Amino acid sequence: MIHPIPPGTRDVLPDEMRELRAIGVRMREVFAGAGYGEVHTPSLEYEDVLRWGEERAAGARYRTFDEHGAVLALRSDMTIPIARLVATRFRDPTEPLRLFYEGRAWRVVGDATGQQREFLQSGIELIGVLGADAEAEVIALAVEALAAAGLARHRVGLGDGALYRTLLAALEVPLDRHRDLLACLSRRDLAGLAGRVTDLDLAPDARELLIRLPELRGGPEVLDRVDGPAARGALEGLRTLYGALERRGVSDRVILDLGLVRELGYYTGAVYEVYDPAVGFALGGGGRYDELIGRFGDGRPACGLTLDVQRVHIAQAAEERLR
Amino acid sequence: MIHPIPPGTRDVLPDEMRELRAIGVRMREVFAGAGYGEVHTPSLEYEDVLRWGEERAAGARYRTFDEHGAVLALRSDMTIPIARLVATRFRDPTEPLRLFYEGRAWRVVGDATGQQREFLQSGIELIGVLGADAEAEVIALAVEALAAAGLARHRVGLGDGALYRTLLAALEVPLDRHRDLLACLSRRDLAGLAGRVTDLDLAPDARELLIRLPELRGGPEVLDRVDGPAARGALEGLRTLYGALERRGVSDRVILDLGLVRELGYYTGAVYEVYDPAVGFALGGGGRYDELIGRFGDGRPACGLTLDVQRVHIAQAAEERLR
């Protein structure tokens, strides 16, 4: 008899479970040591409430019904429920909050192999603080947590989630083309992006900017390779953040990546993704989301970063084999 | 703006979360120290597979669909998924297995207030070992885990899940009345039970046995207050288990309770429930389930016990206030 479990879910046996627990404990110790407090939210929430956080994410959620026929959904990320929690339970919008979590989230998967249906996420949210130093704190803490988990060569890709959208608007690319272009960018299909940009009715230098920008990755020098009034705000923000990361001694971990966009739509400024050279997938990511909490109550600025504990474990095991 | 979460679910803020984590860690340390290894199973499984574990529990589960239209369900307990895991991943049925878990489960709730929709369960399963000493090991370990979590006055109610059913059959009570009578017993409605038994067409001493038996609670002397061939097997089993608990030095924690039945239908022998005098609800329970794993593969005997971490925390806080 074979009793399959749904693809994208896993049974974990004791040897691996011990290692996952150890990674979780070490990361939580780093977060707690930096003054972050752990919170928990329900796995099942009213779908109507979660939708306020992001309409587009609704399709990624598993839905079921409560005893009165109301639609409940399994959370597909942790940041939206925590934004709801903050607006509801922490009433003073001027008080900075440092929160962390370790919990599961679920996403509807397609037929592509290797997609995870159930994730274990560990992450931090820094709420009520504007400015690059908040983002630098979050990035530096994630770098430290991953070192505590046993990684040595992890890197953070850093971009601006609004930069490409701003450029598209400034160059008057028709609105109905934006989603398709951003989707190419978000799945790193730069060839597909170049093809679509070439078809646009644009001046040659505008086309070149849209094709070249996502290829700009590296140290702070990449910030000098772009110009134009539309890009200036984002570039200035990234320059300031890079300076704050230098002061925290983690800028050698950071790769500027001007084509970085994150799948979720609530990011309003800097976005980041975490990698390890031992594995071919992102270990997590995050960014600034200054408008999300305001959808649930008094607005406050915020930024955060989440790590996939299972993927961190795979990277840690791969690093260990390389040593 | 108010953003409700579904009744029976909770947001947990940092102070409480620290205490819940501490309880979880201490209980897991006790389990691991006794040679138990932690396992994890997916929250979402195929409903068809879970049904093999218990048909009746299907109504308690939240259901959703996967991308192919197959029905997925959120697990409503941890023992059925672990039985599936054991049958699938541990192929040698003669090897004793000591497993533990800490994870969430979900149940459909009615309109009654106070029912939990989402639970955090921490528990143990001792698989492949027949006999009272296995049950005594599980009970003693749970008693120790609760002491490590900060409880001091916790007690274990001990009964036989098959005893009352066996008596009903031996006294030739019509089969269509069993479910109603057992439901009364399971919700401790002894007045309702007495009324229904009085209506049965039975000899006076049979009626008295069915009414009196569930009232028998206390030390080993209660085992001498019942007789009859139908009860003999269960009584002998409880006597042997009580002896094993005495040898482990935990019999002073145990209250024999001949009316104890557990809601889940897979128990085949001894059943137990854990209480603390500071709170008015069970903290957990378990029993022997020798037929469950066989529904998923090679059969093997097993017993286990689960604790509700949230309830353990409430009891621990109540105990602290009493000190």
Image (spheres, coloured by chain):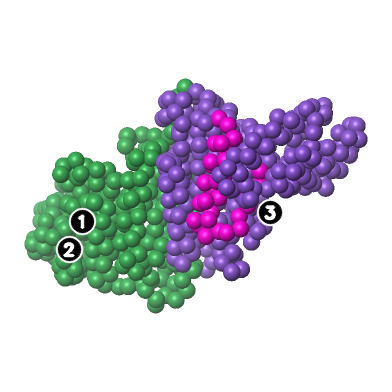
Chain colours: A green, B purple
| Quadrant of the image occupied by residue B321 | bottom right
Residue at 40 percent across and 44 percent down: it is A118
Mark 3 lies on residue: B112
Where are the magenta residues, as a range?
A: B130-158
Mark 1 lies on residue: A156
- Which x, y percent locates residue A158? 20, 58
Looking at numbered disc 1 in the image, what kind of residue is underneath it?
Answer: Val
Residue extending furthest toward the front: B247
Up the image or down, B27 lies above or below B212; here it is below
Compute the Cα span from label 1 to label 2. 10 Å
Q: Nearer the viewer, mark 1 or mark 2?
A: 2
Up the image or down, B91 lies above or below A155; here it is above
Chain letter of disc 3 in the image: B
Residue at 13 percent across and 60 percent down: it is A252
Q: Is residue B140 magenta?
A: yes
Q: Is there CB contact under 8 Å for labels 2 and 3?
A: no
Q: Is there CB contact under 8 Å for labels 1 and 2?
A: yes
Looking at numbered disc 2 in the image, what kind of residue is underneath it?
Answer: Val
